[in-house]
Amino acid sequence: MGTAEPRKLNTIDLRVPTTAARAGVVACHHCGLLSRFRVGPRLLCPRCGGALHLRKPNSEARTWALVIAAILFYIPANVYPVTHTTYLGSTQSDTILSGVYYFITTGSWYIALIIFVASIVVPALKIVALVFLLVSVRRHSTWRPEERTRLYHITEVIGRWSMVDVYVVTVMVALLRLGALANIDAGVGIVFFGAVVVTTMFAANSFDPRLIWDAMEISA
Amino acid sequence: MSPDAYLACHHCDLLQRRPSLPPNGVAVCARCGAFLCRDRRNSLDRTLALAVSGIIFFIIANSYPFLSLNIEGQTQETRLTSGIFVFFQEGMPWMGILVLVTGIVFPLLELLGLIYVLLPLKVGRISWKTAAVFRLIRSLQPWGMTEVFLLGILVSIVKLASMATIIPGIALYAFLVLIFMVAATTASLNPELIWERLNPEN
Ligand SMILES: [Zn+2]
Ligand SMILES: [Zn+2]
């Protein structure tokens, strides 16, 4: 373990555009400070104490592992019920999709749209986007790096909104606890769904978008 | 305490000279177009004020009834944390932890951590482990989801309105204000201003 010296960067010549890594400089992922990179023991940022890496360590392998876990959780999350509702003596179990259908039939189509997009579309698109980015990076693709960077950024930012169904179930199980009259219990599907949201968020976080641009340098 | 002369894009690693920005201006990366840096001078006092008021509304939101439900004359009153306890009782501790952490603990830590960092800076001091505390709250930030929690609450109210009468409590209104405070705190904070004060030379 060691502390990297802050690099005096007044000497860097930027007439030819270069990356920090190629200039022998590492940017702190936490605070942005630029430090001189050296091979050897673990480097710590001299300003914030965070670990310094030229690229996120094992980014591809970790992202793949988390994406695969998310795919495996996505199936039971959509197959198993997320709520069991008892109302005036009769019990009904709902999956995420049947919950969406319920909102459509009761006329709340905008609520149906929110749940459908946040719970079904967004996690699926996140998984597809990350797989696409991983494959493109592995193949050293030079295709539209700006658009792929933007795709990554969107993936990173929208993930949190998928949590909305978790909170819906939280509020409903708290409010409807009146036994045979009206009661809602959480179904096991919501546990898998929570796991989908968490694993896709971690997956987006472990992907390093700079890998997209490293391929541009190899080909340049 | 002068800003770093150079910075590297977080998304593509391109080294670039820090642009001089007009007030409230935003710079994007010359190569990939990602957000690079923004100008926001003197944002620290405002951030501190917002964080302190956020804590006050946080306490109100956790001390009063949140939502009540009335169905056929029977009433069920809940607090902000009631659903979390139900998850624990029903044998789903991970769900309880997930909601507790994302809906309550991390937003609270973010506000408390900011006060811990900003209050001493106001009088020109640096509190113990400031850099580590600030780094921690920055990395927790994506996991604080009060605004998503609010959307979930609104959806549940619409869903239950067809079978019961829902009565909002004081805590719900406090929670609304809290979400606004958390969002405004995050938006008003320019983390670079804090990092500059922690430069190793100083
Ligand atoms: Zn740092
Ligand atoms: Zn860039």
Image (spheres, helix red, strand yellow):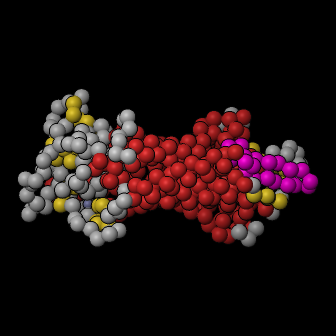
Quarter holding the N terminus of chain A is: top left
Q: Residue at x 34, y 55 (%)?
A: A133
| Residue B164 against residue A39 in the figure, above or below | below
Span shown in magenta: B64-83
Q: Position of residue B111 (x, y in %)?
A: 50, 47
Q: Nearer the viewer, residue B149 or B201?
A: B201
Q: Position of residue B117 (x, y in %)?
A: 41, 44
Q: Residue at x 53, y 47 (%)?
A: B107
Q: Is residue B58 magenta?
A: no
| Residue B138 against residue A121 in the figure, above or below | above
Q: Position of residue B50 (x, y in %)?
A: 51, 55
Quarter assignment of residue A147: bottom left
Q: Position of residue A32 (x, y in %)?
A: 27, 50
The extreme right residue here reads: B73
Left or right: B10, with B44 as reference point: left
Q: Residue at x 40, y 43 (%)?
A: B120
Q: Residue at x 78, y 62 (%)?
A: B161
Q: Is residue B77 magenta?
A: yes
